[in-house]
């Protein structure tokens, strides 16, 4: 049997979104659902209508169409802090205006930690590391002056376990390809933006049972962003978003709300709320941001809730625009 040192069990308890109950046919890999960007996390993880940095490759590749400078975003987060410190979420994204629009590249690496291989007599014979690795390429361009479209292509490599001959277990590696499509519409006279994303369309993943393919965690997101104040000194952004699972269509939607106040393009405070009844997450998010104009750098921090009774998750991010 496996003795998973907190490992996947802790991760699934902490991270499984409300749309995916533990049942036959549930999506096997949750990594494509993990939302990057500490700024977005502080605003209730509602960013599909904003998508104004390199993380647009995840949130809404249509946002790449309006970016005017290259951008780099890096994020790190321990996902089970205090329970399994070797479980982490790592994200890197780069975007650049090109080809009549904007292109981006990103990498998501979900480290699921180390697990022991334990025989029936209790003898530990080895250890292995489990992880998900997802590189993604994205492109966005304008359909009209105020309407952009975007698309992303992703390769999903999910390594749950090696082949374990002593236990009669085949190699637990799953591979798939998928993609996202999106629209982003803006109303400049009203300082409004509307975003729509259909995420994780693609082939089912097959692990060690060739007869049981697992669907990708397909979902759709729709959101609105209102730049209520946008002056030299004060910026106030209000956001709202809903997420609907496309695997189990009878599941409830996830509602997300947030706001960001920024002073003089230097310091920002953020707060949000996630209402996810099936995932048992109904709590506040919050975060801060700091811009260092002299080197075109930014630092963001956010605290995100998990299911009730479980510890919150801290996210740290760096960004550079040049």
Image (cartoon, rainbow, N blue to C red):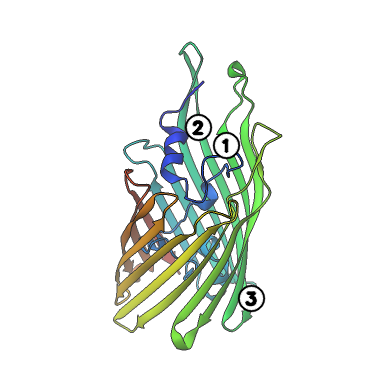
Residue 298 vs residue 169, the one in the foreground: 169
Q: Position of residue 147 (x, y in %)?
A: 59, 79
Q: Position of residue 12 (x, y in %)?
A: 46, 40
Q: Which residue is drawn at 35% across and 61% down?
A: 273
Residue 149 vs residue 95, the one in the foreground: 149
Between disc 3 and disc 1, whose residue precedes? 3
Q: Spatial distance from mark 2 to mark 1, Cα to Cα? A: 8 Å
Q: Which residue is drawn at 42% across and 63% down?
A: 256
Provide the secondary structure element on which disc 1 rests.
Answer: strand
Q: Which residue, given by chain and number where applicable, does mark 3 sit on?
A: 100
Mark 3: give few (<14), some (14-19) or many (20+) Cα within 10 Å. few
Q: Spatial distance from mark 3 to mark 2, Cα to Cα? A: 42 Å
Residue 49 seen in the figure: no
Q: Which residue, given by chain and number where applicable, does mark 1 sit on?
A: 159
Q: Which residue, given by chain and number where applicable, does mark 2 sit on?
A: 129
Between disc 3 and disc 2, whose residue precedes? 3
């Amino acid at each position: 049997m496996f003795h998973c040192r907190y490992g996947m069990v802790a991760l699934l308890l902490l991270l499984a979104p409300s749309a995916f109950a533990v049942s036959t046919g549930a999506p096997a890999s949750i990594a494509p659902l993990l939302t990057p960007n500490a700024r977005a996390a502080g605003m209730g993880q509602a960013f599909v209508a904003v998508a104004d940095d390199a993380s647009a490759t995840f949130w809404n590749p249509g946002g790449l169409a309006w970016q005017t400078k290259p951008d780099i975003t890096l994020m790190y987060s321990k996902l089970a802090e205090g329970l399994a410190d070797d479980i982490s979420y790592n994200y890197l994204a780069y975007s650049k205006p090109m080809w009549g629009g904007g292109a981006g590249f990103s990498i998501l690496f979900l480290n699921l930690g180390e697990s022991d291989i334990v025989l029936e007599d209790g003898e530990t014979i080895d250890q292995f590391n489990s992880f998900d690795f997802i590189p993604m390429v994205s492109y966005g361009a304008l359909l009209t002056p105020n309407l952009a479209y975007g698309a992303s292509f992703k390769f999903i490599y999910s390594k749950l376990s090696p082949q374990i001959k002593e236990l009669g277990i085949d190699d637990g590696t799953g591979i798939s390809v998928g993609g996202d499509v999106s629209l982003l519409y803006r109303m400049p006279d009203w300082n409004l933006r509307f975003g729509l994303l259909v995420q994780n369309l693609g082939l089912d993943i097959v692990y060690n049972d060739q007869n049981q393919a697992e669907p990708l965690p397909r979902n759709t997101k729709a959101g609105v962003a209102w730049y209520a104040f946008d002056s030299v000194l004060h910026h106030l952004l209000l956001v709202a978003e809903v997420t609907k699972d496309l695997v189990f269509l009878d599941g409830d939607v996830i509602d997300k709300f947030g706001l960001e106040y920024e002073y003089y393009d230097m310091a920002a405070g953020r707060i949000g709320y996630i209402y996810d009844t099936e995932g048992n997450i109904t709590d506040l998010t919050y975060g801060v941001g700091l811009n260092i104009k002299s080197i075109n750098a930014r630092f963001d921090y956010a605290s995100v809730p998990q299911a009730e009774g479980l510890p919150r998750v801290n996210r740290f991010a760096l960004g550079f625009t040049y």
